[in-house]
Image: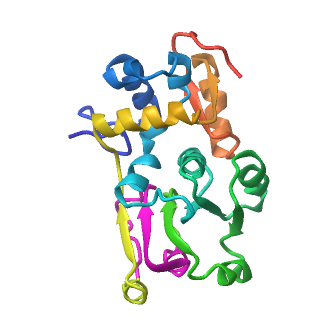
């Protein structure tokens, strides 16, 4: 099996999910055409639907539950939208204070934590029913586990470096019977369910649509973190750019 994210293709190259998943959605997926989404909306929609699938699978959908979302990028911002549509209280956890306004004012999160602010993290200990961690870069997990209530769940979505194992102090899970797990993608039924839910609640990913001519500029911007929140390449120039 070759997945669309950081795996080796038959020719030896590394797969780049965003380029493949949108092509797949637009060309082969029957679920797309059964939804109420216009194709232009689908094109802007929900890369890898990680947020919806793990929330459903791990029971993190009940109104009033408190969900933490680590990282406010392509996955994180959609996870916030899903969680708010489920009626949950949402706290965004980020290393960057600059993302606070986007989290609260634009996406509707209820609170914002700067992960390296020890006072903020201390005040939030034991307050969350679950955490969706979308960050792939190496980072400490214990501070996140400590934010969970009893029986809380930390769900990893960010694909880590396969050659660098994640450090995990198991004792931090013992206290409070906490769980750490991970989620990748789901099948067609889950995809259809996600698309219908997103259509009902008017949820789509916030992206910048670019043409093939702008790819090099986009890559330069990516290295600076200057994208909100993903680039979508309109190969056929069929969509209006933002």
Whether residue 47 is in magenta: the answer is no
Q: Is residue 4 above or below residue 155?
A: above
Which residues fall within the magenta stretch? 140-168
Q: Is residue 18 above or below residue 34?
A: below
Find residue 49 and report its horizontal and vertical position in percent: 44, 42
Q: Is residue 234 visible?
A: no
Q: Residue at x 46, y 55 (%)?
A: 158
Front-most of residues 151 and 92: 151
Front-most of residues 59 and 54: 59
Residue 19 in which image quadrant: top left
Q: Is residue 96 left or right of residue 64?
A: right
Q: Residue at x 34, y 36 (%)?
A: 13
Q: Is residue 13 left or right of residue 143?
A: left
Residue 203 in which image quadrant: top right
Find residue 141 and report its horizontal and vertical position in percent: 49, 74
Whether residue 144 is in magenta: the answer is yes
Q: Is residue 111 left or right of residue 15?
A: right
């Amino acid at each position: 099996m070759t997945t669309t994210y950081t795996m080796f293709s038959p020719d030896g190259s590394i797969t780049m999910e965003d380029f493949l998943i949108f092509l797949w959605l637009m060309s082969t997926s029957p679920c797309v055409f059964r939804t109420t989404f216009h194709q232009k909306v689908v094109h802007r929609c929900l890369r890898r639907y990680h947020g919806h699938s793990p929330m459903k699978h791990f029971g993190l959908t009940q109104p009033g539950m408190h969900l933490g979302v680590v990282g406010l990028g392509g996955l994180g911002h959609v996870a916030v939208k899903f969680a708010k549509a489920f009626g949950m209280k949402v706290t965004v956890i980020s290393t960057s204070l600059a993302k606070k306004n986007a989290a609260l004012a634009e996406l509707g999160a209820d609170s914002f934590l700067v992960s390296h602010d020890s006072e903020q993290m201390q005040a939030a200990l034991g307050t969350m029913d679950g955490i969706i961690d979308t960050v792939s870069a190496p980072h400490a997990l214990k501070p996140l586990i400590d934010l969970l209530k009893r029986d809380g769940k930390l769900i990893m979505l960010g694909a880590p470096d396969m050659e660098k194992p994640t450090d995990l102090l198991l004792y931090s899970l013992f206290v409070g019977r906490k769980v750490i797990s991970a989620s990748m993608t789901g099948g067609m039924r889950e995809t259809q369910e996600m698309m219908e839910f997103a259509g009902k609640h008017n949820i789509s990913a916030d992206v910048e649509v670019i043409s093939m001519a702008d790819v090099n500029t986009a890559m330069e911007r990516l290295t600076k973190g200057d994208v909100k929140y993903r680039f979508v390449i309109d190969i056929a120039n069929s969509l209006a750019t933002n």
